[in-house]
Image (spheres, rainbow, N blue to C red):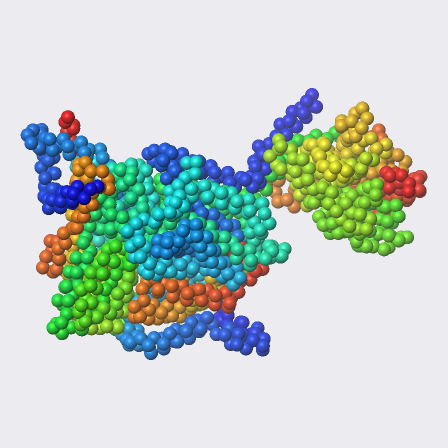
Amino acid sequence: MNMSSGELLNSKAGPGSVVKAALKSLTQEQIIVLVTFVFVAIFSIFINGFATVGNLMVLLRNMSVLGIFSIGMGIVVIGRGIDLSQVTTGAVSAAWVLKLMHDGMGITSAILLGLALVLLVGVINGYLIAFIEIPPLFATLASGICVYGFVRHFLLELLNNHYVPDTCKDFLFLGQGKIGGIPMPVICFGLIALFVHLFLSRISYGRFIYAQGDNEDAARITGIGVRPMKVLQYTLCAAIGYIAAIVMASSTASLNVRIVDSTLIFDVVLVVVLGGISLVGGRGSVLSVLAGTALIGTLLNGMVIMNLGIAQQNLVKSIVLLGAILLDTFLHPRDEETARQGDI
Amino acid sequence: MDQPKKKRVMVWGARIICVLGLSLFISNVAVAAEIAGISGSSAELHKHYDKSLRGKTIGFVPLALGSPLMGSWDYNMRKEAKECGMIYKVKDPNWNAQASAQAISAFIAEGVDVLVAHNMNMQLLAKLLRKAEKKGIFVIQINMVSNYKTDVFVGADWYSIGLRQAERVLKHCGKGTGKSGKVAIMQGELTSAANIEQVEAIMSVLKNHPEIKVVSSQAGNWDSNIEHDNMATILKQHPDLCATIGIWGISHLGAAQAIKEAEMTDQVLVVTSGGGSVQICDAIEAGLIDVYFNYQSLLQGHDIMAAAKLLLQSGLEPGQAKIALFSPVFEITKKNSSYSCFPYPFPEEMMEALKIDYPFLPISE
Amino acid sequence: MSQLNDGLLQLRYRWSFKKFLAELLEKRWMDGIIPFGIMVCVILVFGSQVENYFSPDVLAMTAREFAEPGFVALAMAVTLISGGIDLSVGGMFAIINFLSLMLTHIYGWPALAVVPAALAVGALMGALNGFLIGFLKTRAFLTTLVTMIAFRAIVKLLNLEFAPKIALSAKTTFYESTVWDYMGDGSFLGIPSNVVILLVVAFIGHVLLTRSRPGWRVYAVGGGRRSARHVGIKVERTIFFVYVISGILTALGAVFYAARLDSAASETGMGLEILALMAVVLGGVSILGGKGTPGRALMGIVIVMVITNALLRLGIDSALNSLIQGLILLFAIGIDVKWLKHLYASIEKIYVVPTYLSLPKALDPRPGSGTVFEFNDRLKDAETIGLDQIDGPEDVILDRQGRLYGSVRQGWIVRFSGDDFSKRDIFANIGGRPLGMAFDRDENLVVCVGGMGLYGVRPDGEVYKMTDETNRTWTRLKDDSRIRLADDCDIAPDGKVYFSEATIRYKMEEWPVDGQECRPNGRLICYDPATDRTKTIVRNLIFPNGVCLAHDGRSILIGLTWKCDVLRYWLEGPKKGRIETVISGLPIYIDNINRASDGNYWLASVGLRTPVYDLAMRMPSFRLRMVKFVPPDEWLYPNVNWGCVIKFNEQGDVLESYWDPLGNYAHVTSMREHMGYLYLGGLHNNRIGRIKIQGADPEWTGPDSYWGKK
């Protein structure tokens, strides 16, 4: 696992394909970081007010929420899954937390209750995928719709917008506070990145995720409890998504559950895939997420400064994502002999 | 319909608008009279009123329920329909265009008497609404006007709100104020009638003032998170921003929050508009929003019902009337923010009012 | 008394619900029965809840709304069947809708020109998806997710540019066109126009998909991409066209939508992909690919639309609505996954249904018993032919030139020639599992091929099909028209080929399992080369195996393996068409029967009956428990390890028996007499053996006996 895919590929490359080998000797993260630098350079030259410390801090801050979501997603994608319910679950649970606080509950107990809900959803997702063996795409697609309907109907009284009440101003520290001049969302992002990085690279369970993502059957045969592992992944993913949603709610002091209908979840997948966590599983790391976040953050920031509309932004994003998918297919081509049925 | 008759209808409509403020009061009096046993001059009116309204169905298709705007319409329609013995039905398409069309079709199929449609954009329901009128259903459109003009339009006058917003910004940033003159406009959905008209009005004023520069005009899809992130970026790029105009207050709160984070609330004038729920007044008190044009969504709900009653009693055929009821708009600032908003979600006491069983007398012959 | 008891027990075990169920579940149309049931229930339940749901007006209106998602569901179904998915249908729908309105309202195109233009653009967008997924091999889900975002963004941009113009044109006048209005509002015989087109398209699609070569390719690619590639299907191209078709179907739905609503909203088609997905999965189109039909997709869309429409009309709030929809989706997919996963396992679990069979007491074959079956060593000195050059010659036969043929496991007919049969060549490669053989008048070799049917091989080695289908038994649930396990054949003087099919319930490699059942699953079939007609003549035989034309050519002898009987079927004479028992209750399991030079018959025995298994045959519930709870390799099987060759006469008296104490020819499935020698074949043998027969006619050959000297 310590050997990057680039090195592996490089060791096999023949002398004839120097350019291809050179390209392949770079890991996808490195490519993305390079591309990011190119974008930063271009934007700095052509866009006024881009290359300022202030703007870069805004960029980082704006990307933190997306980054946190993506780290959670990264874990399941490494394990060859995907969680399309992540944003929904996080958002409606955070909205419930705001509602609970509005109804007079304390900050800590509200957040803990919300966490319990999210963990439950994560476990259910994991159960559906690991034990009932529903393909993750469909399981999480459906569970997202269910969670949205359930929470909105039974817990949120159908309300869309939720606000942080005056009694809970402390809650805003998470999203709006600063420690040593660094905004809290950035700190949260950093801490979670660090923890997940340590988890994935230093803890045996984390490394098992790579094994499982790489080849589930082999992992099972070697004695890894693949099913409980999957439940763990989806639970972690949901929990991290919840943190992201809480930070998001705190930084705008409100939350609109309609965010569920937005393209945010696709942005999350975009960041993950772009950074080099291939959808075939077992590849990439937290660093990939950081690289992907940097690129998307730079792009979005640049496009906003250039005054592009949401539609144009989405168009550019989808073209970039398409490029990322093609790159992924090029670097990790589908093996027709081992591809599994229903693995779409 | 011949021209003079149409004119008469218009005049009749205009009169009704004038008395709208009083009609709530009047209907209460009417109920009181009914209970006491009707005699005298109101008896005849009451008979007509009861016969025209009792048991009639009014169907409502909002964009979605669950926000203060649609919630307050729903509340008042539910309450007032019950008061006059009408049957109120609502179908919630939850921001889904197809479901919206389906809901309208379903109401047409069920044969309601009055249809209240909240149109997602200028066109979505146009053809269906025409069909409804042909089938003999009165159609009231609210807030978002469609290409096909039905019997009644109830809603904010977006153009005038836009003009007033621009005026406020001019006063704050225009010539002689010594400010940068940089203005950001935070749009909602680019194709919605409200958005188009309001932005058009704002631009029509601002373009005559070269000192004002619109530095950003982006759509946030009615999403406060997007507005938040966009505003944060704009502020870094234009630290001397003078004012921002939001189309919808609820989503503009996101932008206001970003301004607060940048500690620029004193410098940037935040102007927006909306139905006037309590979250806005809280934000104004907290200094997040400076000027808010309130088109009073609770009152709009009442207007809808008034228009429905009017149509049902008028003896007109569906499609004959063309009435606009533009909602009265007043400006909320820090001065009047403590008493200008309605609570949302509605408190228990208000919800209790929906459960009252109103006494009805038999319709006298 | 005991006979009556036997009869009753046989009756009791003859018909089994489990057998019925297993064969029912095996039916392909069963996959469609469940959604059909759900559809009926949903319509009844929700229809009764919503007021005047079934009035013709309302029904027509609802049907009109159903049709447009119906087209999208068809698109989704095709992509799912091909093993992919198309999430961009909603985006495409919106683009086409917008485009149609743009062309009609702004550019004033006639409706008849708009439709092909819209379909072409739909095909183009589908081609983009198809190119990426088919040729560049990106993953369908993500790719179409991204193109969905892109298409939506394009609609938004178009909307900004043109929506005001469309709005403006609509403000002054509605677009007037008879065709356009007919598409949006018209009906044909009271059925809305778009529903009519949908049904026509679905019907054509159904026929194309299930009854044509390109359609089968789609199923093949979806059901097993690797196998499809291995058999030479152009997977890339198939997938490409699937997405093109998806685009066209979606475009068709969108054009109708445009005509009906005249609305250029950019929200058009939001969530349509989820709706369509939910529908087709509920209809029984599997997300794992290769399963489902357009008809089922339509059933699915009816279910989903009835539910969503009813929930909307009942005024259920949107959150509860989405909760219900999500649960339904989850339920449908869960059922789909579990159904597919467990269907075959459960069929397998209940498929074997043993029945009661009581065999008469067997004659004792032990040494010293004094019976005709008494164990001896007459095969001990058999010469060996082609040792280790041949794998399981089930049947052996010799031609006029004295060349020896064996039907072997590889699907070949192996020929040995030369003085001592030292020259080996592969006479023909048929495939399948060649079993019994016979020469016809023109010296063509007629071969029963397990898994394929009845084939012929001309003297030059050319293989041709004779038949692989017979008339179907319409009273049986299981389709028995295909010939699965043709076992042995013989040819009557008039050229008709009579052959046995051992069992219709099991495949070649599972034939011992049929011995667990001992059901009359086999039959005797006649193929007439003159008319190329195939007909089943005797049904319900217990594993009919050997078939041999009697010396006088007037009747056929049939050996029933598990029943240990030899039957005679009269081809002509006073008993024509009747069947009678020649020998019953042999102590051995019968395989092939062939003529002997002395006017008697040789009979190969594949195994020896054992008291234990005879007992088990009378205890069907015991065998059932065994089949259910014990792994197959530990089942109690009939003994097929130790057999012999016997000779019997026309009256059914057993004259002598030949045994091999060495075990080289213990498992004999066939024997042929030729010029005084007896040649021995075995299903699992690695050789052919021959022994000199005492007192046999050294000039006698099989072909001469059948067709006379040449």
Identify the residue at the far left of this view: B40
Q: Depth check: give the residue in front, A154 or C166.
A: C166
Identify the residue at the far top of this view: C1
Identify the residue shown where x is 14% and y is 27%.
B364
How many numbered circles does the render carry? 0
Does the rendering let one see residue B127? yes
Identify the residue shown where x is 19% and y is 52%.
B156
User: Where is C29 relative to B44, above or below?
Assistant: below
Query: Residue A291 at x, y = what percent?
Result: 40, 70
User: Where is A255 relative to B232, above or below?
Assistant: above
Query: Residue A281 at x, y = what percent?
Result: 48, 62
User: Where is C6 relative to A150, above or below?
Assistant: above
Query: Residue B117 at x, y = what percent?
Result: 26, 46
Left or right of C290 on screen, residue C502: right
Q: Depth check: give the residue in front, C375 or B67.
A: B67
Identify the residue shown where x is 35% and y is 59%.
C158
